[in-house]
Image: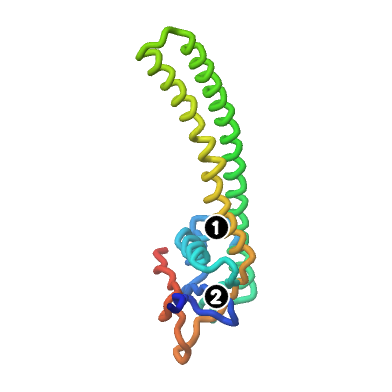
Amino acid sequence: MEPPKSVYRTDNGTIIIELVLRNVMQLFNSLDPSPFHEKELDPDAEEYIFNAVVDQPKKIPVKMAIYLPEESITESTRESIILGIHNHFIYKSSVSDRELRRLFERGRIVLLIAMGFLFGSLLGRQYLATLEQSLPVRMAEEGLLIFGWVTLWEPVYIFIYGWWPIVQKRRIYDKITAMEVEVLPVPTSKQASPGSAPGVRNASPDTT
């Protein structure tokens, strides 16, 4: 069986993620008053870029092509777009780092609390074992044991499973940060229009 074909265009083994814009403001958050190279990306643009990179095999290089009307492309605009995309995902990567540190800090705290409850439940079981055995006493023993182990559920989840989605997300941000970005004029009618091909996203109409 042949492997599935990518919906994205490739160039010398590099996958190209393409985004067609009518103006630069479609790429950035219009409510952010920062200069272009420091602006946050529009949430829809961020989601598209992130999901497009997630879709690609890890070991295959990826680059991005931003298409704009030729008259709106200047050297300053090109640099601002490239810096803006990279700076945005550098920031998102640093946010993931902080999120991971806070998660492990919480994990250590809840682990200490859980170990205290487990220690107390085991002491309680030892005390109950000295009493005359009856159904209520045995139920209390089993309840203490279950309670002690249940308190370990959250720290166990954090240290085994909870950290991985954050690390995976950070790796995608880092890959986008290192990704080559090109700002190109929208091809003329004599050329294949990027918006007509699969794997190419036309930005939604600007509502501003």
Residues packed near mark 2 inside 10 Å, few (<14), some (14 to 19) or many (20 plus): many
Q: Is residue 37 visible?
A: no
- Residue 185 point in image, percent of width and height: 54, 81
Residue hosting label 1: 40
Instruction: Name the residue at 46% across, 87% down.
Output: 192
- Residue 132 point in image, percent of width and height: 42, 7
Which image quadrant for residue 174?
bottom right
In this view, the residue in front, 164 or 97, is: 164
Instruction: Name the residue at 53% across, 24% down.
Output: 118
Instruction: Name the residue at 49% across, 59% down.
Output: 30
Instruction: Name the residue at 60% across, 36% down.
Output: 105
Residue hosting label 2: 15
Counting residues from the start of the chain, the first of labels 1 and 2 encountered is 2
Separation (CA) of disc 1 from disc 2: 25 Å
Query: Looking at numbered disc 1 in the image, what kind of residue is underneath it?
Result: Glu
Q: Quadrant of the N terminus?
A: bottom left
Query: Looking at numbered disc 2 in the image, what kind of residue is underneath it?
Result: Ile
Q: What element carries label 1?
A: loop
Residue extending furthest toward the bottom? 190
Residue extending furthest toward the front? 133
